[in-house]
Amino acid sequence: MLRSLFSRFGKKEDPMADYSMVKTDMHSHLIPGIDDGAKSIEDSVTLVGELHRLGFSKLITTPHIMSDYFRNNPENINAGLIKVREAIAEAGISVEIEAAAEYYVDDGFVSKLENEKLLTFGGNYLLFEVSYINCPDNIDDIIFRMQVQGYKPVMAHPERYPFWYNNFNRYKQFRDQGVLLQVNTNSLSGYYGMEAKRTAEKMVDEGIVDMIGTDCHHLRHIEGLKRGLSDKYIKSLVETNLLNKHL
């Protein structure tokens, strides 16, 4: 949905977007107390309400799973999801919410991949991230293992990994391997700095963005999402056929 804004002189300005055309936010941290996202159920309700007001009709929340830091699993994630569903229903917020996970590719990930049923969303999409310091040397092999197990790998916020800023071709190589690329909407608003913004913009220009996600952890992210609504790249993305619309 687009709404027109008018200046005080009556001149029609460029329309501001909302996220209703995207429909689904597939990356967030809304289950309280299990990672670095929502701290309390009250936080969860507030963030869900704000995302719904921004136009999202469905949320897929994705708590971190890290072997050494956030030792979450399907059991505690799904238990937390039930609590969030109950709280937003009591608050009268009419939004669908599901849960998957954001898997950190660390030493324990391959073991999980080979021995556990991982949390996915949509058409068996598996959201994963890597270290911001360096990418694992065996990332191509790990991606292949995901695919052998029947998962469709989705790389979280590739535009935020500084080691690829001077190697943009790497993003295209990942897509050639069958990896889907998910850009954080707030990267385009400048929230994570100019390098991430420029990289995200180039990804949009090159047509290699498959999904967008808010990666919402707290109200500062909500404010960034609101500021970004007038950004031309965000307006362009919400009108394209992102996979979000089919989740």
Image (tube, rainbow, N blue to C red):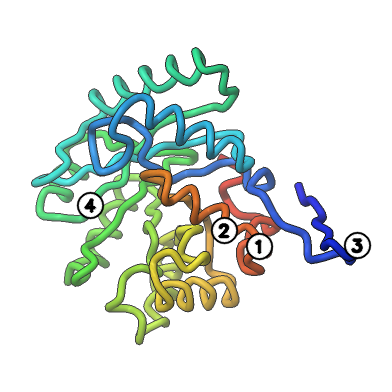
- Whether the residues at callouts 2 and 1 have beta carbons within 8 Å, the answer is yes
Which x, y percent locates residue 35?
Answer: 24, 39
Query: Which sits in the foreground, 165 or 174?
Result: 165
Which x, y percent locates residue 230?
Answer: 66, 62
Q: State the mark number for residue 104.
A: 4
Disc 2 and disc 1: Cα gap in Å? 7 Å
Disc 2 secondary structure class: helix
**Crowd class of label 1 (few under 14; some 14 to 19; many from 20; radius 10 Å):** some
Q: Residue at x 82, y 55 (%)?
A: 4
Disc 4 secondary structure class: strand
Dot 3 corresponds to which residue? 10
Q: Is residue 136 left or right of residue 121?
A: left
Q: Residue at x 12, y 45 (%)?
A: 69
**Crowd class of label 3 (few under 14; some 14 to 19; many from 20; radius 10 Å):** few
Dot 2 corresponds to which residue? 227
Q: Residue at x 53, y 78 (%)?
A: 202
Dot 1 corresponds to which residue? 230
Q: Is residue 43 above or below residue 2?
A: above
